[in-house]
Amino acid sequence: MRRSRSKSVSKIRVAMVGGGIGGFIGEIHRMAMRLDNRYDLVAGALSSEPERSIRSAMELGLERPYGTWEELIEAEQGDIDCIAIVTPNDSHAAIATAALEAGYHVVLDKPMTRTLNEAVTLAELALQSTQMLALTYTYTGYPMIREMKSRIAGGEIGSLRAVSVSYRQGWLSSAIENEGQKQALWRTNPALCGAGALGDIGSHAEQLARFVTGHSIQSVRGDVHSVVGGRKVDDHATVQMKLSEGIIGDLIVSQVSTGERNNVEVKVYGEDGALTWSHGEPDVLALLKQDGTEHRFHCSVNRAPSGHPAGFVEAFANIYSDCANVMQGSDGMIIDAQEGLASMKFIHAVLQSQESQTWVEL
Protein backbone atom coordinates (compact mmCIF):
# COMPACT_ATOMS: atom_id res chain seq x y z
CA MET A 1 0.00 0.00 0.00
CA ARG A 2 2.99 2.33 0.35
CA ARG A 3 4.59 3.52 -2.86
CA SER A 4 6.76 6.44 -3.79
CA ARG A 5 6.87 7.65 -7.36
CA SER A 6 6.69 10.54 -9.76
CA LYS A 7 8.14 14.01 -9.99
CA SER A 8 8.09 16.68 -7.31
CA VAL A 9 5.69 19.56 -7.87
CA SER A 10 4.84 22.53 -5.68
CA LYS A 11 1.10 22.09 -6.03
CA ILE A 12 -0.82 19.31 -7.72
CA ARG A 13 -2.98 20.42 -10.62
CA VAL A 14 -6.07 18.27 -10.76
CA ALA A 15 -9.11 17.78 -12.98
CA MET A 16 -12.33 16.21 -11.80
CA VAL A 17 -14.59 13.87 -13.75
CA GLY A 18 -18.11 13.64 -12.31
CA GLY A 19 -19.16 15.32 -9.10
CA GLY A 20 -21.20 18.19 -10.49
CA ILE A 21 -23.18 20.62 -8.36
CA GLY A 22 -26.05 18.90 -6.57
CA GLY A 23 -24.21 15.63 -6.02
CA PHE A 24 -22.83 14.47 -2.67
CA ILE A 25 -19.39 12.97 -3.04
CA GLY A 26 -17.93 15.46 -5.51
CA GLU A 27 -18.11 18.30 -3.00
CA ILE A 28 -16.53 16.08 -0.32
CA HIS A 29 -13.57 15.50 -2.67
CA ARG A 30 -13.30 19.23 -3.34
CA MET A 31 -13.40 20.13 0.36
CA ALA A 32 -10.74 17.47 1.08
CA MET A 33 -8.48 18.93 -1.61
CA ARG A 34 -8.85 22.43 -0.20
CA LEU A 35 -8.19 21.55 3.42
CA ASP A 36 -4.39 21.30 3.18
CA ASN A 37 -4.03 23.57 0.14
CA ARG A 38 -1.94 21.08 -1.83
CA TYR A 39 -4.16 20.91 -4.92
CA ASP A 40 -5.37 23.28 -7.61
CA LEU A 41 -8.64 22.07 -9.14
CA VAL A 42 -8.49 23.75 -12.53
CA ALA A 43 -10.52 21.65 -14.97
CA GLY A 44 -13.54 19.40 -14.98
CA ALA A 45 -16.04 17.32 -16.90
CA LEU A 46 -18.58 17.18 -14.12
CA SER A 47 -21.57 15.48 -15.73
CA SER A 48 -22.42 12.94 -18.41
CA GLU A 49 -24.59 15.66 -19.97
CA PRO A 50 -22.23 18.07 -21.81
CA GLU A 51 -24.21 21.26 -21.22
CA ARG A 52 -24.69 20.50 -17.54
CA SER A 53 -21.03 19.51 -17.27
CA ILE A 54 -19.84 22.88 -18.55
CA ARG A 55 -22.39 24.80 -16.50
CA SER A 56 -21.35 23.04 -13.28
CA ALA A 57 -17.66 23.69 -13.94
CA MET A 58 -18.32 27.37 -14.60
CA GLU A 59 -20.42 27.70 -11.44
CA LEU A 60 -17.52 26.23 -9.48
CA GLY A 61 -15.13 28.70 -11.07
CA LEU A 62 -12.95 26.13 -12.82
CA GLU A 63 -10.56 27.57 -15.37
CA ARG A 64 -11.28 24.99 -18.06
CA PRO A 65 -14.70 23.33 -18.32
CA TYR A 66 -15.28 20.36 -20.63
CA GLY A 67 -18.42 18.72 -21.97
CA THR A 68 -16.97 15.20 -21.86
CA TRP A 69 -14.24 13.38 -19.99
CA GLU A 70 -12.74 12.22 -23.29
CA GLU A 71 -12.18 15.84 -24.33
CA LEU A 72 -10.65 16.64 -20.94
CA ILE A 73 -8.17 13.75 -20.94
CA GLU A 74 -6.99 14.54 -24.47
CA ALA A 75 -6.71 18.30 -24.00
CA GLU A 76 -5.06 18.41 -20.58
CA GLN A 77 -2.06 16.14 -21.19
CA GLY A 78 1.04 17.89 -19.89
CA ASP A 79 -0.97 20.49 -17.97
CA ILE A 80 -2.74 18.35 -15.37
CA ASP A 81 -1.06 15.99 -12.90
CA CYS A 82 -4.05 14.04 -11.64
CA ILE A 83 -7.60 13.06 -12.56
CA ALA A 84 -10.11 12.63 -9.69
CA ILE A 85 -12.94 10.32 -10.78
CA VAL A 86 -16.22 10.58 -8.86
CA THR A 87 -18.70 9.10 -11.32
CA PRO A 88 -21.08 6.15 -10.84
CA ASN A 89 -19.36 2.76 -10.85
CA ASP A 90 -20.15 1.81 -14.44
CA SER A 91 -17.73 4.38 -15.91
CA HIS A 92 -14.84 3.95 -13.44
CA ALA A 93 -12.94 1.42 -15.54
CA ALA A 94 -13.12 3.31 -18.83
CA ILE A 95 -12.15 6.70 -17.38
CA ALA A 96 -9.37 5.38 -15.13
CA THR A 97 -7.93 3.31 -17.97
CA ALA A 98 -7.87 6.27 -20.35
CA ALA A 99 -6.34 8.52 -17.68
CA LEU A 100 -3.54 6.09 -16.78
CA GLU A 101 -2.74 5.43 -20.43
CA ALA A 102 -2.56 9.18 -21.04
CA GLY A 103 -0.05 9.61 -18.21
CA TYR A 104 -2.19 11.01 -15.41
CA HIS A 105 -2.22 9.98 -11.78
CA VAL A 106 -5.69 8.80 -10.76
CA VAL A 107 -7.70 9.23 -7.57
CA LEU A 108 -10.73 6.99 -7.91
CA ASP A 109 -13.85 6.75 -5.79
CA LYS A 110 -14.56 3.25 -4.52
CA PRO A 111 -15.48 0.57 -5.47
CA MET A 112 -12.85 0.36 -8.15
CA THR A 113 -15.19 -0.83 -10.92
CA ARG A 114 -18.65 -2.22 -11.56
CA THR A 115 -17.55 -5.81 -12.27
CA LEU A 116 -14.73 -8.13 -11.24
CA ASN A 117 -13.53 -8.54 -14.84
CA GLU A 118 -13.16 -4.78 -15.18
CA ALA A 119 -11.23 -4.69 -11.90
CA VAL A 120 -8.80 -7.41 -13.00
CA THR A 121 -7.99 -5.53 -16.22
CA LEU A 122 -7.61 -2.16 -14.49
CA ALA A 123 -5.42 -3.61 -11.74
CA GLU A 124 -3.10 -5.14 -14.34
CA LEU A 125 -2.78 -1.78 -16.09
CA ALA A 126 -2.14 0.05 -12.81
CA LEU A 127 0.56 -2.45 -11.86
CA GLN A 128 2.40 -1.76 -15.14
CA SER A 129 1.93 2.01 -14.96
CA THR A 130 4.42 4.45 -13.47
CA GLN A 131 1.46 6.58 -12.36
CA MET A 132 -0.41 6.31 -9.07
CA LEU A 133 -3.91 4.89 -8.83
CA ALA A 134 -5.41 5.43 -5.38
CA LEU A 135 -8.89 4.63 -4.08
CA THR A 136 -10.78 6.78 -1.59
CA TYR A 137 -11.76 4.32 1.13
CA THR A 138 -12.67 7.14 3.50
CA TYR A 139 -12.54 5.34 6.84
CA THR A 140 -8.88 4.41 6.41
CA GLY A 141 -8.21 8.15 6.67
CA TYR A 142 -9.45 8.40 10.26
CA PRO A 143 -6.49 8.79 12.63
CA MET A 144 -7.86 6.30 15.16
CA ILE A 145 -8.43 3.63 12.50
CA ARG A 146 -4.75 4.04 11.61
CA GLU A 147 -3.93 3.90 15.32
CA MET A 148 -5.93 0.69 15.59
CA LYS A 149 -3.98 -0.84 12.73
CA SER A 150 -0.68 0.19 14.33
CA ARG A 151 -1.55 -1.19 17.77
CA ILE A 152 -2.69 -4.51 16.30
CA ALA A 153 0.50 -4.80 14.24
CA GLY A 154 2.48 -4.03 17.39
CA GLY A 155 0.92 -6.99 19.20
CA GLU A 156 -1.03 -5.02 21.79
CA ILE A 157 -3.98 -7.45 21.82
CA GLY A 158 -1.90 -10.55 21.12
CA SER A 159 -2.58 -13.19 18.51
CA LEU A 160 -5.69 -12.25 16.54
CA ARG A 161 -8.80 -14.40 16.79
CA ALA A 162 -11.73 -12.54 15.23
CA VAL A 163 -12.78 -9.36 13.45
CA SER A 164 -16.31 -7.98 13.31
CA VAL A 165 -17.36 -5.10 11.06
CA SER A 166 -20.82 -3.60 10.64
CA TYR A 167 -22.03 -0.74 8.49
CA ARG A 168 -25.70 0.14 8.85
CA GLN A 169 -27.67 2.86 7.09
CA GLY A 170 -31.39 3.41 6.81
CA TRP A 171 -31.73 5.82 3.90
CA LEU A 172 -32.94 3.13 1.46
CA SER A 173 -35.57 1.69 3.82
CA SER A 174 -38.22 2.69 1.30
CA ALA A 175 -38.13 2.71 -2.49
CA ILE A 176 -37.06 6.34 -2.84
CA GLU A 177 -35.50 5.47 -6.20
CA ASN A 178 -39.06 5.35 -7.54
CA GLU A 179 -39.46 8.99 -6.48
CA GLY A 180 -36.43 10.05 -8.53
CA GLN A 181 -33.98 10.56 -5.63
CA LYS A 182 -30.68 11.11 -7.46
CA GLN A 183 -28.33 9.10 -5.26
CA ALA A 184 -30.79 6.22 -4.95
CA LEU A 185 -31.44 6.08 -8.69
CA TRP A 186 -27.96 4.98 -9.69
CA ARG A 187 -27.15 3.07 -6.49
CA THR A 188 -30.11 0.75 -7.07
CA ASN A 189 -29.60 0.33 -10.81
CA PRO A 190 -27.46 -2.80 -11.41
CA ALA A 191 -26.37 -1.52 -14.83
CA LEU A 192 -24.72 1.46 -13.09
CA CYS A 193 -23.67 0.15 -9.68
CA GLY A 194 -23.12 -3.60 -10.12
CA ALA A 195 -23.83 -4.67 -6.54
CA GLY A 196 -26.05 -2.67 -4.20
CA ALA A 197 -25.23 -2.33 -0.50
CA LEU A 198 -22.33 -4.76 -0.93
CA GLY A 199 -20.66 -2.52 -3.48
CA ASP A 200 -21.57 0.81 -1.91
CA ILE A 201 -20.85 0.28 1.80
CA GLY A 202 -19.83 -3.39 1.89
CA SER A 203 -16.64 -2.48 0.07
CA HIS A 204 -15.84 -0.05 2.91
CA ALA A 205 -16.61 -2.66 5.56
CA GLU A 206 -14.58 -5.54 4.14
CA GLN A 207 -11.66 -3.23 3.36
CA LEU A 208 -11.68 -2.03 6.96
CA ALA A 209 -11.47 -5.65 8.16
CA ARG A 210 -8.39 -6.22 6.02
CA PHE A 211 -6.86 -2.80 6.72
CA VAL A 212 -6.87 -2.94 10.50
CA THR A 213 -5.91 -6.62 10.84
CA GLY A 214 -3.36 -6.73 8.02
CA HIS A 215 -4.83 -10.06 6.90
CA SER A 216 -6.47 -11.13 3.67
CA ILE A 217 -9.97 -12.59 3.38
CA GLN A 218 -9.67 -16.12 2.01
CA SER A 219 -13.26 -17.38 1.87
CA VAL A 220 -16.78 -16.12 2.52
CA ARG A 221 -20.31 -17.34 3.04
CA GLY A 222 -22.96 -14.75 2.27
CA ASP A 223 -26.62 -14.26 3.09
CA VAL A 224 -27.75 -11.51 0.73
CA HIS A 225 -31.19 -9.87 0.52
CA SER A 226 -33.22 -7.31 -1.37
CA VAL A 227 -35.55 -6.31 1.44
CA VAL A 228 -37.49 -3.55 -0.32
CA GLY A 229 -39.94 -5.05 -2.80
CA GLY A 230 -39.04 -4.69 -6.46
CA ARG A 231 -35.47 -3.57 -5.79
CA LYS A 232 -33.04 -5.09 -8.30
CA VAL A 233 -29.91 -4.98 -6.13
CA ASP A 234 -29.04 -6.16 -2.63
CA ASP A 235 -29.80 -3.80 0.24
CA HIS A 236 -28.83 -6.01 3.21
CA ALA A 237 -26.16 -8.69 3.61
CA THR A 238 -24.58 -10.77 6.36
CA VAL A 239 -21.24 -12.41 5.61
CA GLN A 240 -19.16 -14.98 7.45
CA MET A 241 -15.46 -14.68 6.68
CA LYS A 242 -12.31 -16.75 7.05
CA LEU A 243 -9.11 -14.71 7.00
CA SER A 244 -5.49 -15.76 6.75
CA GLU A 245 -3.81 -17.42 9.76
CA GLY A 246 -7.08 -18.86 11.02
CA ILE A 247 -8.76 -15.54 11.90
CA ILE A 248 -12.55 -15.68 11.71
CA GLY A 249 -14.79 -12.76 10.87
CA ASP A 250 -18.31 -11.50 10.41
CA LEU A 251 -19.64 -8.55 8.46
CA ILE A 252 -23.05 -6.91 8.27
CA VAL A 253 -23.99 -4.22 5.78
CA SER A 254 -27.44 -2.76 5.45
CA GLN A 255 -29.05 0.25 3.83
CA VAL A 256 -32.51 -0.70 5.11
CA SER A 257 -31.82 -0.52 8.87
CA THR A 258 -34.56 1.98 9.55
CA GLY A 259 -33.42 4.98 11.58
CA GLU A 260 -29.70 4.35 11.21
CA ARG A 261 -27.70 7.21 9.74
CA ASN A 262 -24.12 6.12 9.04
CA ASN A 263 -23.26 3.60 11.73
CA VAL A 264 -19.83 2.03 11.17
CA GLU A 265 -18.24 -0.19 13.82
CA VAL A 266 -15.01 -2.20 13.80
CA LYS A 267 -14.06 -4.71 16.51
CA VAL A 268 -10.92 -6.86 16.58
CA TYR A 269 -10.47 -9.56 19.21
CA GLY A 270 -7.12 -11.01 20.20
CA GLU A 271 -5.80 -13.46 22.75
CA ASP A 272 -4.96 -10.65 25.19
CA GLY A 273 -7.72 -8.11 24.54
CA ALA A 274 -9.79 -6.28 21.95
CA LEU A 275 -9.78 -2.96 20.12
CA THR A 276 -13.02 -1.29 19.04
CA TRP A 277 -13.86 1.84 17.01
CA SER A 278 -17.17 3.48 16.15
CA HIS A 279 -17.94 6.19 13.61
CA GLY A 280 -20.21 7.75 16.22
CA GLU A 281 -17.10 8.53 18.30
CA PRO A 282 -14.37 8.68 15.65
CA ASP A 283 -11.70 10.26 17.86
CA VAL A 284 -11.83 7.41 20.40
CA LEU A 285 -10.24 3.97 20.27
CA ALA A 286 -11.22 1.57 23.06
CA LEU A 287 -8.96 -1.18 24.39
CA LEU A 288 -10.83 -3.95 26.21
CA LYS A 289 -8.79 -6.15 28.55
CA GLN A 290 -9.49 -9.69 29.69
CA ASP A 291 -10.22 -8.51 33.24
CA GLY A 292 -13.13 -6.40 32.00
CA THR A 293 -11.40 -3.02 32.14
CA GLU A 294 -11.71 -0.55 29.28
CA HIS A 295 -9.05 1.96 28.30
CA ARG A 296 -10.01 4.80 25.98
CA PHE A 297 -7.44 6.52 23.76
CA HIS A 298 -8.27 9.92 22.31
CA CYS A 299 -6.97 11.26 19.03
CA SER A 300 -4.06 13.65 19.33
CA VAL A 301 -3.16 13.77 15.62
CA ASN A 302 -5.38 16.31 13.92
CA ARG A 303 -5.21 19.69 12.23
CA ALA A 304 -6.80 21.29 15.30
CA PRO A 305 -5.66 20.82 18.91
CA SER A 306 -6.59 17.60 20.72
CA GLY A 307 -10.23 17.62 21.77
CA HIS A 308 -11.44 19.11 18.50
CA PRO A 309 -12.84 16.02 16.75
CA ALA A 310 -11.67 15.02 13.29
CA GLY A 311 -14.57 14.21 11.02
CA PHE A 312 -15.46 12.76 7.64
CA VAL A 313 -13.96 15.58 5.55
CA GLU A 314 -10.71 15.51 7.53
CA ALA A 315 -10.47 11.75 6.99
CA PHE A 316 -10.95 12.32 3.27
CA ALA A 317 -8.32 15.07 3.39
CA ASN A 318 -5.84 12.68 5.04
CA ILE A 319 -6.27 10.38 2.05
CA TYR A 320 -5.72 13.27 -0.36
CA SER A 321 -2.66 14.32 1.64
CA ASP A 322 -1.18 10.83 1.33
CA CYS A 323 -1.94 10.84 -2.40
CA ALA A 324 -0.15 14.18 -2.72
CA ASN A 325 2.87 12.75 -0.90
CA VAL A 326 3.07 9.81 -3.30
CA MET A 327 2.60 11.98 -6.39
CA GLN A 328 5.36 14.29 -5.16
CA GLY A 329 7.78 11.45 -4.57
CA SER A 330 7.55 10.79 -0.84
CA ASP A 331 5.81 8.21 1.34
CA GLY A 332 2.06 7.97 1.71
CA MET A 333 -0.42 5.33 2.80
CA ILE A 334 -2.64 4.80 -0.23
CA ILE A 335 -5.21 2.15 -1.06
CA ASP A 336 -4.00 0.99 -4.45
CA ALA A 337 -5.43 -1.01 -7.34
CA GLN A 338 -4.53 -4.36 -5.81
CA GLU A 339 -6.54 -3.43 -2.73
CA GLY A 340 -9.39 -2.31 -4.96
CA LEU A 341 -9.24 -5.63 -6.79
CA ALA A 342 -9.41 -7.49 -3.47
CA SER A 343 -12.64 -5.62 -2.66
CA MET A 344 -14.16 -6.57 -6.00
CA LYS A 345 -13.19 -10.22 -5.44
CA PHE A 346 -14.93 -10.08 -2.07
CA ILE A 347 -18.16 -8.68 -3.54
CA HIS A 348 -18.11 -11.22 -6.37
CA ALA A 349 -17.49 -14.13 -3.97
CA VAL A 350 -20.30 -13.10 -1.60
CA LEU A 351 -22.79 -12.98 -4.47
CA GLN A 352 -21.54 -16.35 -5.71
CA SER A 353 -21.96 -17.74 -2.21
CA GLN A 354 -25.54 -16.51 -2.05
CA GLU A 355 -26.27 -18.26 -5.33
CA SER A 356 -24.58 -21.55 -4.41
CA GLN A 357 -25.38 -21.45 -0.67
CA THR A 358 -21.82 -22.60 0.05
CA TRP A 359 -18.50 -21.16 1.18
CA VAL A 360 -16.65 -19.53 -1.72
CA GLU A 361 -12.89 -18.93 -1.88
CA LEU A 362 -11.62 -15.58 -3.08
Image: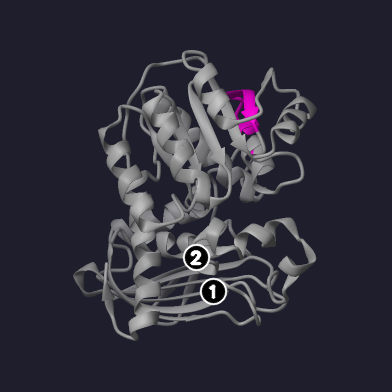
Query: Which stretch is magenta?
Result: 32-45
Q: Where is residue 78 in the image (x, y as percent from the top left)?
A: 47, 13
Q: Is 171 positioned to the left or the right of 114 in the image?
A: right
N-term-proximal mark, 2 vs 1? 2
Q: Nearer the viewer, residue 153 or 64?
A: 64
Q: Where is residue 149 in the image (x, y as percent from the top left)?
A: 38, 56
- On screen, 275 above or below 87? below
| Numbered badge on residue 234 | 1
Residue at the image position 28 percent from the left and 81 percent from the top: 359
| Numbered badge on residue 18 | none
- On screen, 198 above or below 109? below
- On screen, 48 above or below 169? above
Circle 2 — which element?
loop
| Numbered badge on residue 195 | 2
Tell me, yes or no, whether the two marked residues, 2 and 1, touch with CB atoms within 8 Å.
Answer: yes
Q: Quadrant of the N terminus?
A: top left
Say which amino acid is labelled 2: Ala
Circle 1 — which element?
loop
Q: Where is residue 105 in the image (x, y as percent from the top left)?
A: 43, 29
Q: Is 13 positioned to the left or the right of 172 in the image?
A: left
